[in-house]
Image (spheres, helix red, strand yellow):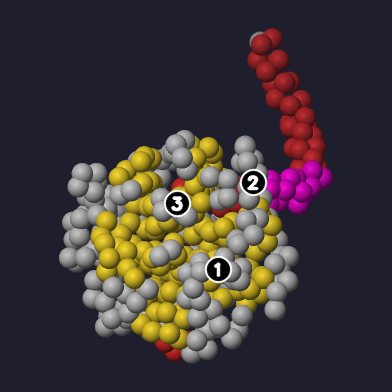
């Protein structure tokens, strides 16, 4: 009897207490919850996004080229001869010239009539006396595909690296599978990123046509890649790779291939598709295809690469799709190959006329 009465009294006394607790809880939510949503959440969100800076270091040269109608396909790559006044543009499409040549003033020079290029991806121009040449990576599946090829200025084939028409991973004989880009140093060392979505995810250095070192396999760890897409060398002997699938830049010692670090904080919203060094050596020029943006990243001094710092941006129009870029050592101009816009554009330093 006593126990039943105790239970009855407890339930009756608990109801007002429950109501009081509910009222206090609702008042607390009304007071504090808006503050949490308006302050804490956005702060955490924006801290993770890359800082968008506009310093206007470069401006569009609207007069280049003089005759844009020469672009007749999807423009994938662009290369500037470091000495001669030549800009090479690589494009894809049926029954069209794969390489076009312009001057830096925008005058059309000529087109290549070669049939040895199927699907150009990357293109790089060198000028080491007495030979000026152009290197093209070919991701086609025909008899000339899966190769890196060297041409004269006028488009005469000089040599082929890789096994034409046969994708693979072998090193002897050397094979590629959709090689994305090639970079040739002033010392004629050849760096190749092999793996625009194919079997391979690797970085290869060739010296005197022999493999000096190789780094990479598919993965997200140090020295691993997922679609290595572009490559450049800075002025203190470091190789920078646009690791597209992993949304980062990785950096290696050019002499030894030692992994030196990576940057990912600048690429939260889109991957780096292309990387080049400005003519003054101060910035990396990075294309981001999906957000139609060009980034200018501060080049770190020798030693620890530190954090990734965005110094400037160029926001392009929607659906322009900047793919690969190159820089003129003579004028400092930046040339952008644009898949979506089916054109190449030129940007010049704002401190130059």
Q: In the image, is 240 to the left or to the right of 351? A: left
Q: In the image, is 278 to the left or to the right of 249? A: right
337, above or below 181, in the image: below
Q: Quadrant of the C terminus?
A: bottom right
Q: How far apart are the two marked residues, 2 and 1, measured between alpha carbons?
A: 21 Å
Measured as percent of width and height from the top left, residue 350 is found at 71, 72
Q: Which mark is residue 328?
A: 1
Measured as percent of width and height from the top left, residue 15 is found at 74, 31
- Sequence-first disc among 1 and 3: 3
Measured as percent of width and height from the top left, residue 97 is found at 32, 81
Name the residue rendered at 54%, 42% in the picture.
262
- Asked if residue 179 is among those painted magenta in the image, a careful observer would answer no
Q: Residues within 10 Å of mark 2 (few under 14, many from 20)?
A: some
Q: Nearer the viewer, residue 29 or 96?
A: 96
Residue bounds of the magenta highlight: 31-49
Q: What element carries label 3?
A: loop
Q: In which quarter of the image is the N terminus?
A: top right
- Sequence-first disc among 3 and 2: 3
Q: Which residue lies furthest to the top in this view?
A: 2
Q: Nearer the viewer, residue 270 or 308?
A: 308
Q: Viewer-nearest of labels 3 and 2?
A: 3
Q: What element carries label 1?
A: loop
The residue identified by callout 2 is 300
Q: Viewer-nearest of labels 1 and 3?
A: 3
- Sequence-first disc among 2 and 1: 2
Rendered image quadrant of residue 277: bottom right
The residue identified by callout 3 is 187
Mark 2–mark 1 CB contact (< 8 Å): no
Q: Residues within 10 Å of mark 3 (few under 14, many from 20)?
A: few
């Amino acid at each position: 009897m006593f126990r039943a009465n105790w239970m009855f009294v407890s339930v009756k006394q608990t109801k007002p207490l429950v109501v009081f607790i509910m009222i206090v809880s609702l008042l607390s939510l009304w007071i504090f919850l808006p503050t949490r949503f308006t302050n804490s959440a956005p702060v955490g969100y924006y801290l993770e996004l890359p800082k968008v800076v506009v310093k206007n270091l470069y401006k569009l040269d609207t007069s280049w080229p003089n005759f844009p109608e020469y672009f007749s396909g999807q423009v994938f790559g662009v290369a500037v001869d470091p000495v001669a006044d030549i800009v090479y543009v690589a494009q894809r499409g049926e029954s069209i010239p794969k390489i076009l040549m312009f001057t830096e003033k925008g005058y059309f020079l000529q087109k290549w009539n070669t049939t040895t290029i199927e699907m150009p991806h990357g293109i790089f121009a060198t000028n080491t006396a007495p030979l000026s040449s152009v290197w093209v990576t070919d991701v086609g599946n025909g008899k000339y595909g899966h190769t890196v090829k060297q041409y004269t200025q006028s488009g005469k084939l000089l040599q082929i690296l890789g096994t034409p028409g046969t994708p693979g991973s072998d090193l002897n004989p050397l094979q590629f599978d959709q090689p994305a880009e090639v970079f040739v140093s002033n010392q004629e060392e050849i760096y190749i990123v092999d793996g625009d979505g194919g079997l391979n995810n690797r970085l290869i250095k060739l010296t005197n046509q022999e493999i000096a070192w190789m780094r990479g396999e598919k993965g997200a760890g140090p020295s691993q890649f997922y679609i290595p897409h572009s490559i450049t060398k800075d002025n203190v002997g470091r190789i920078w790779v646009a690791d597209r699938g992993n949304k980062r830049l990785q950096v290696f010692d050019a002499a030894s291939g030692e992994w030196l670090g990576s940057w990912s904080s600048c690429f939260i919203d889109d991957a780096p598709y292309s990387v080049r060094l400005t003519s003054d050596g101060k910035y990396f020029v990075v294309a981001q295809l999906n957000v139609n943006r060009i980034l200018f990243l501060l080049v770190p001094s020798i030693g620890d690469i530190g954090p990734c710092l965005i110094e400037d941006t160029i926001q392009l129009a929607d659906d322009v799709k900047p793919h690969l870029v190159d820089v003129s050592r003579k004028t400092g101009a930046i040339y952008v190959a644009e898949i979506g816009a089916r054109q190449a554009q030129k940007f010049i330093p704002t401190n130059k006329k």
